Amino acid sequence: MRLLNIQRRRRPKIAAAAGIVAIAAAAGLSACGSPNAVTQPSATSAPPEFHQVSQASGSPITVWVDSTRLPGVQAYQKSHPNVKMNIVTYSGDANGSNYLQTKIELYDRAGSGWPDVVFSEEYNDAAWSTAQGTDWVAPLNKGVVPQATLDGFAPNALAPCTVDGNVYCLRNDIGQNVLWYNAKLMKQFGYQVPTTWEQYQALGAQVAKQHPGYITGSVGDPWTPEVYFWASQCPANTISGNSVAISTGNANCTKMAALLDAGVKNGSLTKQSAFATSFVKQYAAKTLMLIGPSWYGQYVFNAALKVPAGQVAAGAPLTWSGQSAPSTGDVGGGIWMVSKYSRNLAAAGALAQYMATSNDYQLTAPTYPAYKPAATAWLAAQAKQHYFASDVSAVFEQAANEIWGGWGTGRFSQENIWAASMTPPINGGKTISSLLPAWQTAIENQARSFGYTVGG
Amino acid sequence: MAVSPQVRAGAPAVPERPRARKARTGGRAGYGFVSGYFVLLLLFGIGPTVYAIWLAISNSSGQLVGFGNFTQVLGDYRFFPAFANVALYLVIWLVVLVVAVVGIALMLHGRMRRASAVSRFFFYLPGALAGAASALVWMFMLDPSVSPVAWLLHGLGYGTFSDTIAPSRLPVVFAIMAFWTGAGGWIVVMYGALNNIPGELLEAARIDGASVLKTAWYVQIPLLRKWIAYMLILAFATGTQLFVEPQLVGEASLGQVSDTWSPNQLAYEYAFHANNFNDASAVSIYLLVLGLAAAALVVFKSGLFEVGS
């Protein structure tokens, strides 16, 4: 009996040992290549020359959109019954879900299955979509979308889409940052709307003393770097080809960090995200100012905080006193991409162009159009809704032109880095100034892991 | 020679059961019944494992690279933190699982037999909820501004969701989630195992004057040993593969949980963010080896697969 047990027990051991030996032999003895270098995919070399796959006019196109953009695509289908469309709703890659890249890389391995037109809420998706090895998008300036249309986009709006002079996506909207404020409260408290960062900081200190509990901004959102550090021209995301140069010790970064620390300390800046449920409960009626993208007006103040109409207004982006060229950051902004594998590029390109540029759709969109003629019409339509205390058109247009061009578009996400490595210690009581070196390390590590060369 | 496990545990020796007569005829029909499952196992279990091993020892051009991928991921700055996170989580979750599941099963079996069918049903319910759905339930539970147990969270000094999911608290948070979804099913299994213990044994213990506690400690728990080992192996394997909870909590908190918190997430990051399926496979092979080693340890220590006794 016992002998039997031992034999029974030994057999799997022998099998396992044999297996391990076999694997080791395969692995160790016959090694001849080298592991995948972490420096791929490479962004330095442009995607290979574009050759269309054989076209079949009238063939159906598969379209991936998020729920926000879905009605627009459905309307297009209704007005273009001759275009055969297969519409798929997905997350739009929101909040770093990375769904699109997951799927595309599986299709790459399978060699089929790519959608024809894709909307992504993350313009960063253009970076890997155009990088050698994972590229799957068609250059739209090569006969798909007219050059005149491409020229109509706001300055820098197509920068994330552009590699070596070719345009690989159309920007749907931009999220230029402005100074949102509650005009009614400002008047009631007798405050002037600040125009410089210095005035903003001073007003924050005053609010903390005179009206504790009211806030002038938040440092809890993942896009905190894009709201404050991008506007301050902090070189934390300088990307050129395949190299990244980070310097969070630069004066443009440290003075902004000091400003934020002062606000957090006196309580005028909250550590909560404007999208946290607790924020809505605590600050719905106590948000005096909030620096953020153009879409905050409708999404945050109107939809989430439910601030009544006629109270919210937008001020021009803040500048440091003495700053010659005003600058602001950008939070989000979706893109339309067309697959280079599409068998009906004409229909796919036409849809992408319609969605990004036509007044028909963009007038109904909740976000600021990246295409200038559509933006003008959109602003006029917004003014008719009478939600804002004053017309935001001039401020939006000014901010759209002031987005600083020194903040790159990488295959890694600055928002992910900030949220995972900065937000928890800030919540734990550390100052942003003291965390700047850690931020630098986190960005560099992440950049390296995506194959970038890190320089000083 | 080794003492028999029961003697070692100090329990009265179990009377040897009459040896089960081996059905030697009809063996072929058995193969027939198993074959359907076996084919699926081969296609979706063994096949992918072999493919992963192949990917782990080759590069993207299909050349063999030996252990190159393994040393490369070992040098990744995210590798050790991910394994450390999961190790801490496992310690908490496995200890709580064993103590609570065995404890509750014993209570149900001994003390509240009448109510136990209903309780077992309720214990099982959360387990029937899919992992993602249960994680979503927990997001509400853990957010002090909407949680039904907000008073408790406030009492602990957590004012916001970000406070609750501060990095140092994550292993505990995930262990609670895992316990909530996983423990109920195991309580039902343990209860079934307790039913298998012959009544005469417990009666003999009672006659010998053993208290309820002593009966549990010296008779019931030693006889549950194999079941506990079985639970440990499976819980360890699922625990090391933690993915859904950190991923969802990370997305719900707009990224406050690192997207490489657990090794499985790191593998996912390699495959689908860096397009490096080879390194992703290397991480998965590390997990496989770890799981096999832990299982082997438990199996050989507990004599799980011993036949007869």
Image (spheres, rainbow, N blue to C red):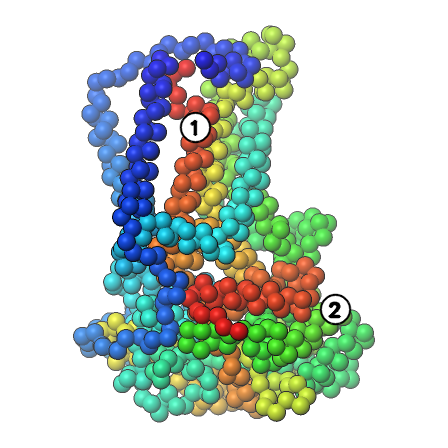
Labels 1, 2: front one? 1
Q: Which residue is mark 1?
A: B299
- In the rendered view of the protein, which quadrant contains the N terminus of chain A? top left
Q: Chain of mark 1?
A: B
Q: Nearer the viewer, residue A7 or A333?
A: A7
Q: Is residue B280 above or below residue B235?
A: below
Q: Residue at x 31, y 88 (%)?
A: A146
Let me know if residue B141 appears in the view.
Answer: no
| The disc label shown at residue B274, or none | none
Q: Which of the 4 image quarters holds residue A78? A: bottom left
Residue B208 in picture, x, y percent from top left: 61, 7
Q: Chain of mark 2?
A: A
Q: Is residue A353 left or right of residue B12?
A: left
Report the amino acid beneath label 2.
Lys
Q: Which residue is mark 2?
A: A265
Residue A302 in picture, x, y percent from top left: 59, 75
Q: Is residue A104 above or below residue A314?
A: above
Q: Secondary structure at mark 2?
A: helix
Report the amino acid beneath label 1.
Val
Q: Residue at x 57, y 74 (%)?
A: A247
